[in-house]
C-alpha cells in the first residue's frame, strides 16, 4: 500500500523592484529607442505585405474557376460514334 506524503510548499519570495535590477538603466532612454525598428524598415515590411496580399488575391481570383473532380464522376460528351471526351477542368 502506498503512503501519501505531503511535500511542504516552496516559499514565494517577492520579486525585486525595478531599481534593484542592474539592467533597469537599459530599459530607459536612450537605450529604449534602440529596440524599435527604424521607420523605413517598418514601411518596407508593410509594402512587402501589401504586395504579397495582392499576389495572393490575384492568384485566388485566377484559380477560382478551376476545381478538381473525380474523373469517374465527370460526365462524358459524345464527340463521335465511338469517341467520347471529358472536361477535366
Image (cartoon, rainbow, N blue to C red):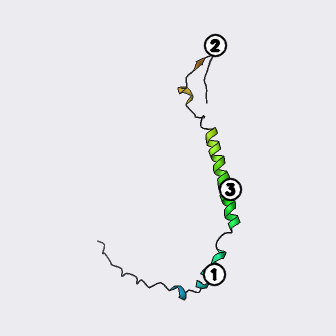
Label 3, secondary structure: give it: helix
Q: Residue furthest bottom?
A: 20
Q: Residue at x 60, y 23 (%)?
A: 86
Asked if the residue under mark 1 is in contact with the one under mark 2, i.e. CB atoms within 8 Å, the reply is no
Locate residue 2: give its quadrant: bottom left
Rendered-image quadrant of the N terminus:
bottom left
Tell me the crowding category of disc 3: few under 14, some 14 to 19, or many 20 or more residues within 10 angstroms, Cα based.
few
Compared with residue 41, is residue 26 higher up or lower down, i.e. above or below? below
**Where residue 48 is drawn, which disc sits there?**
3
Q: In this figure, which residue is indicated by the disc labeled 1?
A: 29
Among numbered discs 3 and 2, the one appearing first in the sequence:
3
Q: Which label lies toward us, 3 or 2? A: 3
Q: Residue at x 61, y 85 (%)?
A: 25
Q: Nearer the viewer, residue 48 or 66?
A: 48
Question: How far is disc 3 from disc 1 in space, using C-alphas?
Answer: 31 Å
- Residues packed near mark 2 inside 10 Å, few (<14), some (14 to 19) or many (20 plus): few
Mark 2 vs 1, N-terminal side: 1
**Residue at 55% across / 23% down in the picture?**
75
Tell me where residue 88 sits by quadrant.
top right
Q: Is residue 83 above or below residue 59?
A: above
> Along the horizontal axis of the image, is 74 left or right of 50?
left
C-alpha distance separating marks 3 and 2? 53 Å
Amino acid at each position: 500500500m502506498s503512503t501519501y506524503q505531503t511535500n511542504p510548499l516552496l516559499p514565494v519570495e517577492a520579486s525585486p523592484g525595478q531599481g534593484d535590477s542592474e539592467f533597469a538603466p537599459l530599459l530607459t532612454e536612450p537605450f529604449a529607442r534602440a529596440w524599435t525598428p527604424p521607420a523605413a524598415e517598418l514601411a518596407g515590411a508593410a509594402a512587402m505585405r501589401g504586395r504579397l496580399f495582392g499576389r495572393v488575391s490575384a492568384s485566388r481570383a485566377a484559380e477560382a474557376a478551376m476545381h478538381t473532380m473525380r474523373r469517374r464522376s465527370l460526365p462524358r460528351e459524345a464527340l463521335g460514334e465511338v469517341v467520347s471526351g471529358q472536361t477535366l477542368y
